Amino acid sequence: MKTLTLGILGGGQLGRMSALAAANLGIAVHIFTPEHNSPASQVSSQTTVAPYNDETALKKFAQSVDIITYEFENIPVDTIRFLKTLTPVYPDEKLLEVSQDRVIEKIFLNEINIETTRWKNYQSDQSILDAFQEWKSSATIIKTTRFGYDGKGQVKVNKHDNINETVRLLNGDKIIEDIVDFTCEISMICARDHEGNIITYGPMLNEHKNHILHLTTVPAGISQKHVHQADKMIRKIAQKIDLKGVLTLELFLTKDGRLLANEIAPRTHNSGHWSMNACLYSQFDNHIRAVCGFPVMDPQRHSDAKMLNLIGEDILDIDRHMKKSGAYLHIYGKSEIREGRKMGHINFISPKTSPTAS
Ligand code: AMP
């Protein structure tokens, strides 16, 4: 029997956990990353270390695998277009194009009638003054349209600030967003297979510290109406984009009861790590299934869960969790501890409280 080989662009923890899930199905993994000794390459049979624009290395990589996927969104779209001429890539570049640029993302969401916060293209500082006036607000958030993550690439601007000085902190194209008065932040994850079957995880309740995900709770404890609405929203996105793979939708639940889409990630997500221990099929199992052409499976969540991220030096304080029943540690194999760096996570698993909560 020929072993299927999956190529993964990116060598981070999402690639690592996807590679582990692939191994369970007997699928070999080849990682392509600019980084030496990456978390994903430690658990994969092959690694190519090269930049994402090295066409010679990309060609050799594509010829050595049957299918290609990616584990983070900042892979250049041209890299995917080039690889696609040689080997199938899932999800394809349409999802990357949408999720790499906040303006394209907002236009896409609004066109398919998914509500977002009010937004405007930043053309000059006058656009911000216009936003204050139009939205009758005294503060806005300015974000870079590309490459922002974990709160990086965004600033809050108050009406009486020195706008010019604040906006200069951000390089490149920008978007102006109205500030959402939210009660909580939630997310949904879905996987869609080649036949168009969709399964979903969530909603998950997400709490952040210093703009980095700190704790995810499942079930999220929101109303069934919002659960169904969030589920419908992510299914619509997956269908409209003809997804083959996994995507994540981050949402705000506003104080007046609306669900607003914040952003789409074209991949598995930190807020889905609990599924590794609280479901029969984790987000990584379904990621591998969806991209490799196998059917996606209902996650069958059997437990409640809290996922605690281990950020930076948190990793030095894990001994006490080692002897805690129901605590399952996942450590990513990163040798260097840095402030804000995701080093691992712990899933705290408990019996399912509500049989109906998703
Ligand atoms: P993002 O990079 O868009 O995910 O934003 C990072 C975090 O900033 C979010 O998780 C929110 O806590 C906060 N945030 C982003 N956009 C807004 C907004 N328009 N209104 C209020 N809070 C926001």
Image (cartoon, rainbow, N blue to C red):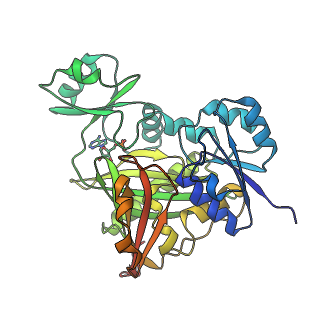
Q: Where in the figure is residue 36, as x and y percent of width and height?
A: 60, 43
Q: Where in the figure is residue 323, as x and y percent of width and height?
A: 39, 79
Task: Please give the count of numbered marks on the rendered protein.
Answer: 0
Q: Is residue 241 placed above or below 278 in the rendered structure?
A: above
Left or right, 346 with reference to 177 = right
Q: Nearer the viewer, residue 140 or 44?
A: 44
Q: Where in the figure is residue 238, as x and y percent of width and height?
A: 55, 51
Whether residue 92 is visible, yes or no, is yes
The residue positioned farthest toward the right in the image shown = 1
Whether residue 114 is visible, yes or no, is no
Which of the image's four quarters has the C terminus? bottom left
Question: Which residue is depicted at the point 57% across and 51% down?
Answer: 239
Left or right, 223 with reference to 86 = left
Left or right, 307 with reference to 234 = left
Which of the image's four quarters has the N terminus? bottom right
Question: Which residue is depicted at the point 25% across and 56% down?
Answer: 257
- Tell which quarter ligand 1 is in: top left
The residue positioned farthest toward the left in the image shown = 160
Q: Nearer the viewer, residue 1 or 258?
A: 1
Q: Where in the figure is residue 116, as x and y percent of width and height?
A: 35, 42
Q: Is residue 155 placed above or below 196 in the rendered structure?
A: above
Q: Is residue 199 placed above or below 141 in the rendered structure?
A: below
Question: Which residue is depicted at the point 57% across and 71% down?
Answer: 281
Q: Is residue 226 placed above or below 239 in the rendered structure?
A: below
Left or right, 5 with reference to 297 = right
Q: Quadrant of residue 86?
A: top right
Q: Nearer the viewer, residue 300 or 339?
A: 339
Question: Which residue is depicted at the point 30% across and 36% down?
Answer: 118
